[in-house]
Image: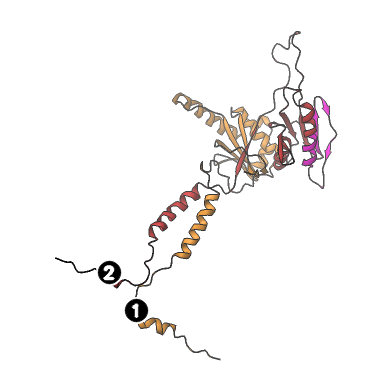
Amino acid sequence: MAFAPSKGKKHGGEGGGGGRMDLNMTSLIDMFTCLLAFLLKSFSAEGALVTPSSGLELPKSVASERAKPGLTVEIGKNEVVVEGVTVATTEEFAKTDFQNLLKSPMYLDLDRRHKSALAMEQYGTKFEGEVIIQGDKDVPFSALYKVMFICARNDYGKMRLIVVSTAES
Amino acid sequence: MAFKPSERRKSEEGPEELDLTPYMNFVMILIPVIMQASEYIKLAMIPINLPPAQGPSIGGPTEQETPEETLDLAVAITSGGFTITAASARLPIIPLKDDDYDYEKLNQDLWKLKQQAQGKYPDDTKIVIASGQDVRYEVIVKAMDATREYKENNKSYMMFPDVSLSSGIT
């Protein structure tokens, strides 16, 4: 059965097209208000000091101490990264013995960073020796321990493991 | 001279609409600012230490000095489960439960130990976690959680927050 054509357009056109139509902003404002409320809930006055690296699945913990920035070492499933620069593959790194670690690219990189940080001390920037380790939850302990070993050998003694906090605020 | 009465009221029809443009501008600026400072994933950090150096100090202890008795608490993580050692004594192994580590039992055993050791030893907040080479990082973090605090009746009690990692097991 064919329906009768709508008369809406006809009626609408009777005004001669000279009328100004206002945009209804109510729904948009409702949406923005909801979005604002949601964002304010997750707002942090200090901002995000440490950004989780993409591709890493950090382990969960009940720890609640707030993460502070520092020299970042990431131990991913495939590679070890220092401040965004890949220094080794995780598998190879976990197998390397401690003597050869002292000649590894990661050791040399941290050594260079340590020396430049010490050189900056004359300008008043104190070397704190802080390092934050972001490890994937599935990496073996041998890889973590070797990263800690290299950090300690280069005077980066204040080590912090970054985890996803499940502590109730 | 008398002025002609205003015709504004007469000519306007219907209620006056609120001008929402300034509010929209404000919200459009506020949203990116808040988005930048928002935390969608709450990150935390666990401070860790390297294990303390073993062996006698330079010169060795003199005869007058009696070495203070220490707890020397350690948890070994192996593929078979957890082993707690304290004050040179080894507790029975905590075996795997349903193919996973029994963190609850570790937590309870350490709480019993904490109650006994509280105030008796100078190192009653320290623990060394020694792990096997192939143990996953997640297991170590969960073991650290089990050693850090004990919860009972919505109250949490601090146990051994000073964690050192060691690779004593090869």
Give the colour chain B carries in the figure. Answer: red
Q: Which chain is orange?
A: A
In this rendering, does residue B114 appear at all?
Answer: yes
**Disc 2 chain ID:** B
Q: Find out whether residue B151 is within the magenta segment.
A: no
Q: CA distance from mark 1 to mark 2?
A: 25 Å
Task: Name the foreground residue: B120 vs A79.
Answer: B120
Q: Secondary structure at mark 1?
A: loop
Q: Can residue A103 be seen in the rendering of this structure? A: no
Q: Judge whether B90 appears above or below B7 on screen.
A: above
Kind of residue at badge 1: Gly
Q: How was this image coloured?
A: by chain
Q: Residue at x 73, y 16 (%)?
A: B56
Vertical relation: A168 (above or below) A19: above
Label 1 chain ID: A
Residues drawn in magenta: B81-109
Q: Nearer the viewer, mark 1 or mark 2?
A: 2
Q: Left or right: where does residue A19 sit relative to residue A123?
A: left
Q: Which residue is mark 2?
A: B8
With A120 as the anchor, is A131 left or right in this view? right
Please give the name of the residue rendered at 44% of the width and 86% of the height, measured from the top-left corner.
A7
CB atoms of marks 1 and 2 within 8 Å: no
Residue B12 lies in quadrant: bottom left
Q: Which residue is mark 1?
A: A17
